[in-house]
Image: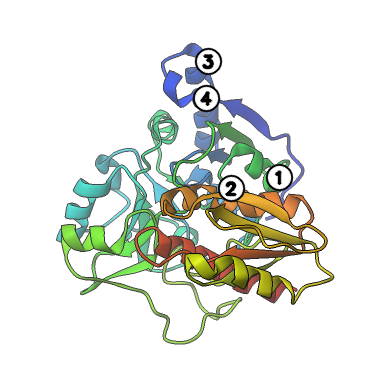
Amino acid sequence: MKIENVKTLQLSVDPSQLGTSQARAAIERAAEILRAGGTVALPTETVYGLGANALDSAAVARIFAAKQRPSWDPVIVHIAGEDMLEGLVLSIPEPARKLMAAFWPGPMTLLLPRSPSVPDSVTAGRPLVGIRMPAHPVALALIRCASIPIAAPSANTFGRISPTTAAHVLEDLDGRIDAVLDAGPAVHGVESTVLDPGRTPMVIYRPGAVTAAQIRDVAGEVEIFRPAAPLRETPKEALPSPGVGLRHYAPKARLILVEASLGEMTRRLADEALHYPAERLGFMLPTGIEAPRTTPAPVIYSWGRWQVPAELAQRLYAGLRALDAQGCTVILCPLPAPEGIGAAIRDRLGKASQAASAAK
């Protein structure tokens, strides 16, 4: 499908003022566009998503065309209540019911057996569909107003940095989508945890804000997905889940990851910087880590507190975009510990690093 240049409507909603006439008008306008088969970038608590009617194959095709997303990469369906599962899924495993009770609304996507009404394009032809109920009040209000399930991958050009603000969406998709609904910055800053609750043990395909330890406490044993063969930039078959592709989250700059203890991190960053004397260097620099002295002076993004991984997650994509915008050609980034949401941060940075290197 060819995307003609369109006028992207910019709508704004204050999440704390949903009862105002201005908020209701903005949400109703966005819902009208979705019901008519259009595309709307909407806020969630994780990142901004590019939404369309999940049951309309032509509307879903507009998502793929706008993002330049390949057909082998499935997308997630967003709902506003468990009653919307009817017509989307054929069955719900008992562990999934426990997880819904514990984590919905919230940043957890469950892979469930799809019904025939779900278009093949949503699942890349696979038998499972990823579904979640977002915790963002504007997203929930929009889904309820539209009265349809909304398919919504991240609202960015395929493979690039996910958007955590409406401005990020417009950087990539202005003129390619019908509307963006601006409700301020995303809270978590990394995409949802994606889990298959129908396997034993259950499988996390993409780490997120809901951690493996939390899942284990609620529903039993869980393991992280490990592909049988190395991931390919262009897979030969459909991916088993949203979020497992190699080519994701990448800045334009080359991304170099540095792992060291807090006391050794400044020295390790300085040593790594020596390998790039002719590059414009940028640093994702957490509080508590001293900036290496390089010539010329690097561009510094104040990433957040090293001891608060949730803060690093919330600011991750904004930081990569900021350093790209300042013309950095190489970005050096410390790797947090793999505990809790740190596992999600490492997952995104690992794929961003590989994708950025592959693009060079």
Q: Which of marks 2 and 4 is nearer the N terminus?
A: 4
Contact between marks 3 and 1 (CB within 8 A): the answer is: no
Callout 1 environment at 10 Å: few (<14), some (14 to 19), or many (20+)? few
Q: Which residue is rendered at x = 47% and y = 87% of the image?
A: 229
Mark-to-mark CA distance, 1 and 2: 9 Å
Callout 2 environment at 10 Å: few (<14), some (14 to 19), or many (20+)? many
Contact between marks 4 and 3 (CB within 8 A): the answer is: yes
Q: Which of marks 4 and 3 is nearer the N terminus?
A: 4
Q: Mark 4 points at which residue?
A: 13
Q: Mark 1 points at which residue?
A: 171
> Toward the viewer: 249 or 28?
249
Q: What residue type is labelled 1?
A: Glu
For the residues carrying marks 3 and 1, which lies nearer the camera in this image? 1
Give coordinates of residue 354: x percent, y percent: 61, 74
Mark-to-mark CA distance, 2 and 4: 17 Å
Disc assigned to residue 22: 3
Contact between marks 1 and 4 (CB within 8 A): the answer is: no
Q: Name the residue under label 2.
A: 163
Q: Is mark 3 on a helix, strand or loop?
A: helix
Callout 4 environment at 10 Å: few (<14), some (14 to 19), or many (20+)? many
Q: How is the image coloured?
A: rainbow
Mark-to-mark CA distance, 3 and 1: 25 Å
Q: Which residue is rendered at x = 71% and y = 49% of the image?
A: 3
Residue 18, compared with residue 221, is above or below; it is: above
Q: What element carries label 4?
A: loop
Q: Is residue 125 left or right of residue 167?
A: left
Q: Which amino acid does label 4 sit on?
A: Val
